[in-house]
């Protein structure tokens, strides 16, 4: 389509700023996946005939991969100018790119993304997590990133050499890194330290991870806990994760966690909630801005939970949120804005 052609041209530009580089990678992945879903026959392989050519998908991410302009592994993350939690989002985007294209189609791209994850491990001193992570949401972003890449099967030659998905654990390479184990560690941190029923009846506190927990519950932290629980269930099939996901969504949708949604903004999620000690009740932390990521993370979590349960009420909830966001936060051209 003409949209794909215009986007393909943009994907080649090497002088893009870092944020634009990441956004275009996201757009290329989304367009590729959407066009492949719409145009592909019942049985199909992803190729350059569907949507954005795979060579252009690789080019879109070139500046974010090893050797690229913005690739600079350090103890803070992999990318120049990014905070650690932002680096986790970039890694997850690259993992989604590798998964959308398919390692069989682009083994070189898979290898470059794998190297980015290995470099992230090598640059840290605490298993996988970079320095500078303070609160639980910081760790949640990294856990989702490693889980996303753990679900991308390696190219067949790499699998024959001992690298691949084995028992839902990615092994091989120089690190023998257990990505699922990393995500489990973060999940256990949430359950053992952050889950709190004495304040607002449930949900997780924000942090910090080290030191006394602060009062108040942030929306994004609770959404990431929900997303992590559903993702771990999809990867492992262990029902403890599904039970926690259902418990968390029950609190967010029917319990006191409902206070995180702002009725004045059509029920979109606000920044979080706090305990009003005078009135002994929880109140929403509603600000003038409804941030798009507070709406987007929960959509992914609800889609994952629906795949696990088949509960169509989850899709109805997700549809309601998405439609409200498009009505209130999108420009006439359909571009989201804060």
Image: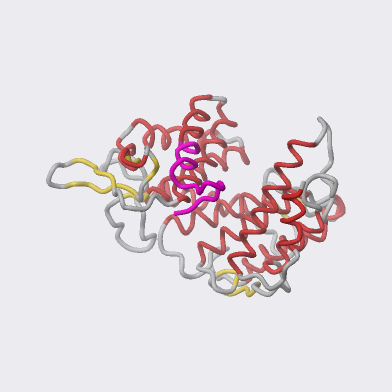
Quadrant of the drawing holding the C terminus: bottom left
Name the residue rendered at 62%, 60% in the picture: 91
Name the residue rendered at 53%, 24% in the picture: 312
Instruction: From the viewer's side, name the closer residue of 316 and 334.
Output: 334
Name the residue rendered at 60%, 60% in the picture: 90
* The magenta segment: 321-338
45 relative position to 99: left or right: right
Quadrant of res 207: bottom left
The correct choice, above or below, for 203 with respect to 127 in the image is above
Residue 227 magenta-highlighted: no
| Residue 297 place in picture, x, y as percent | 50, 46
Count of marks placed on residues: 0
Name the residue rendered at 41%, 64% in the picture: 134
56 relative position to 128: left or right: right
Residue 326 magenta-highlighted: yes
302 relative position to 40: left or right: left
Colouring rule applied to residues: secondary structure
In the displayed image of the protein, which residue is found farthest to the front? Answer: 332
In the displayed image of the protein, which residue is found farthest to the left? Answer: 278
241 relative position to 2: left or right: left
Quadrant of res 324: top left
| Residue 19 place in picture, x, y as percent | 58, 65
| Residue 240 place in picture, x, y as percent | 50, 36
| Residue 40 place in picture, x, y as percent | 80, 36
Instruction: From the viewer's side, name the closer residue of 265 and 81.
Output: 265
């Amino acid at each position: 389509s003409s949209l794909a052609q215009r986007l393909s041209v943009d994907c080649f530009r090497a002088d893009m700023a870092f944020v634009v580089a990441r956004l275009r990678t996201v757009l290329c992945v989304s367009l590729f996946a959407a066009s492949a879903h719409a145009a592909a026959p019942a049985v199909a392989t992803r190729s350059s005939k569907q949507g954005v050519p795979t060579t252009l998908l690789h080019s879109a991410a070139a500046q974010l991969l090893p050797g690229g302009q913005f690739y600079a592994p350090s103890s803070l993350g992999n990318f120049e100018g990014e905070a650690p939690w932002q680096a986790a989002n970039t890694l997850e985007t690259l993992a989604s790119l590798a998964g959308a294209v398919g390692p069989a189609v682009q083994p070189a791209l898979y290898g470059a993304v794998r190297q980015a994850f290995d470099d992230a491990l090598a640059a840290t001193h605490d298993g996988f997590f970079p320095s500078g992570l303070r609160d639980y949401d910081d760790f949640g972003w990294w856990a989702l990133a490693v889980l996303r890449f753990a679900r991308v099967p390696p190219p067949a030659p790499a699998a024959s050499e001992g690298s691949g998905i084995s028992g839902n654990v990615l092994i091989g390479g120089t690190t023998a890194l257990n990505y699922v184990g990393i995500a489990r560690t973060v999940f256990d941190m949430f359950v053992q330290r952050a889950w709190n029923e004495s304040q607002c009846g449930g949900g997780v506190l924000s942090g910090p991870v080290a030191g006394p927990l602060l009062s108040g519950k942030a929306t994004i932290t609770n959404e990431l806990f929900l997303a992590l629980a559903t993702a771990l269930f999809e990867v492992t099939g262990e029902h403890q994760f599904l039970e926690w996901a259902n418990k968390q969504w029950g609190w967010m949708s029917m319990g006191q966690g409902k206070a995180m949604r702002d009725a004045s903004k059509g029920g979109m999620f606000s920044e979080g909630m706090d305990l009003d000690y005078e009135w002994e009740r929880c109140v929403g932390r509603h600000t003038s801005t409804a941030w798009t990521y507070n709406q987007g993370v929960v959509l992914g979590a609800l889609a994952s939970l629906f795949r696990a349960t088949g509960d169509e009420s989850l899709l109805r909830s997700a549809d309601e949120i998405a439609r409200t966001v498009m009505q209130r936060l999108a420009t006439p051209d359909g571009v989201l804005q804060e």
